[in-house]
Amino acid sequence: MSQDSADLLQHPRRNLGNRYRSQAQKFVRLANMDESRFDDNIAWAEQNARQAILHDFTDEKNWRCLADIKVILGDGEGLCALLEDVFSVLGRDPDNVEQLQEIDFLKLGLELLEAAFSRDPLDPDIWWNKINSGNLVDSNIDEFAERCKKLDFTDQRANIIFGRRIERLKNSGYTEEFIQLSKHLLAHRPHNHELWMELGRLHERRGEVDEAWMCYDHVQNLREHVSPRDEFLQRLTSRMDGQEQKQWSKPSVEKREQFLKQMVELSQRVSKSEFEIIDVDSDDSIESEHPDLIRLEILIQNKDFSEAFFLARRLISQGEDWAEDWLKIARLGLSD
């Protein structure tokens, strides 16, 4: 499956979600009306409820619909799996995951689901209204930012949910918080090209040329059929209001390396890989000249594609062309 196709499946489509949920509810009613066809109708209900979530995971009603069907079926394990999926969408908060230990899901599963949505509404506007109420807005935002640093955004759906939340921060004037939290989301899922674009536009509006270029460069690296970096450079160097062309070159190697090093460090927070310092012989092999090759091999083996992506890009920025192949592998892993 292409990256564009995968992105399309993961982006919410409210109309389709509503349609499949409506079908699921219809089959539940039919199952209750005709006992002789209960199994067939409830199976169709469950299938449609799953499709509703697939097409729109941002609508809490779709999750509730499938959860209710799991209770009707007496499927405690299925309800547990649904809650685990919801918690993945919400960034795998340790406090949430801990609640799934040794409980009766048929008795408490629906209650846990509602508690999760009450704390973390999927709708970004409802979420923003919740933390934007009262006299503790700044405190609420600080608490949210600290909490984000503990969450796992490798699930694309979590990246989308929290990306919409931090967009509300940006639109309300909290641009520094947006920049900080964007980097956390992107460290976990670097191929979120839409967030890179949004971050680049913000830096461009603020006159932060180097930062804007690096964001647009990531987009162009991820999506070779678009060229926001080149278009940005053209805007910078074009004549405006009769002025002479501006002379500007891309950010220095040192600045790009510093930026990518920061992204590597952020991505390590969710890394599954552990490393030992390895002594290498002084020969002409790449391993002896570049111990990071060993690190790349371990990262790819452990499917830590985000850290591998930023590490490979940092090496390339230093002129290590051999890392190009590793960058391609990391990109393929991220697109799966």
Image (cartoon, rainbow, N blue to C red):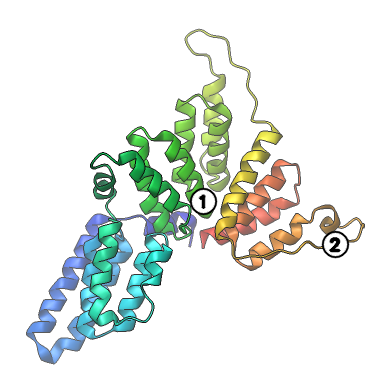
Residue 204, image x, y percentages: 48, 28
Q: Which element carries disc 2, helix, strand or loop?
A: loop
According to the image, label 1 marks what residue? 191
Q: Is residue 267 left or right of residue 312?
A: left
- Name the residue located 65 percent from the left edge and 68 percent from the top edge: 301
Residue 57, image x, y percentages: 31, 61
Q: Is residue 268 left or right of residue 73?
A: right
- Name the residue located 80 percent from the left edge and 53 percent from the top edge: 290
Q: Residue furthest top?
A: 242
The reply to whether residue 306 is in sight is no
Which of the two residues, 22 or 210, is positioned nearer the viewer here? Answer: 210
Residue 17 occupies quadrant: bottom left
Residue 15 occupies quadrant: bottom left
Residue 209, image x, y percentages: 55, 27
According to the image, label 2 marks what residue? 279
Mark 1 crowdedness (10 Å alpha carbons): few <14, some 14-19, many ≥20:
many
Q: Amino acid at mark 2?
A: Asp
Q: Closer to us: mark 2 or mark 1?
A: 2
Mark 2 crowdedness (10 Å alpha carbons): few <14, some 14-19, many ≥20:
few
- Name the residue located 63 percent from the left edge and 22 percent from the top edge: 248
Q: Which element carries disc 1, helix, strand or loop?
A: loop
Q: Residue furthest bottom?
A: 36
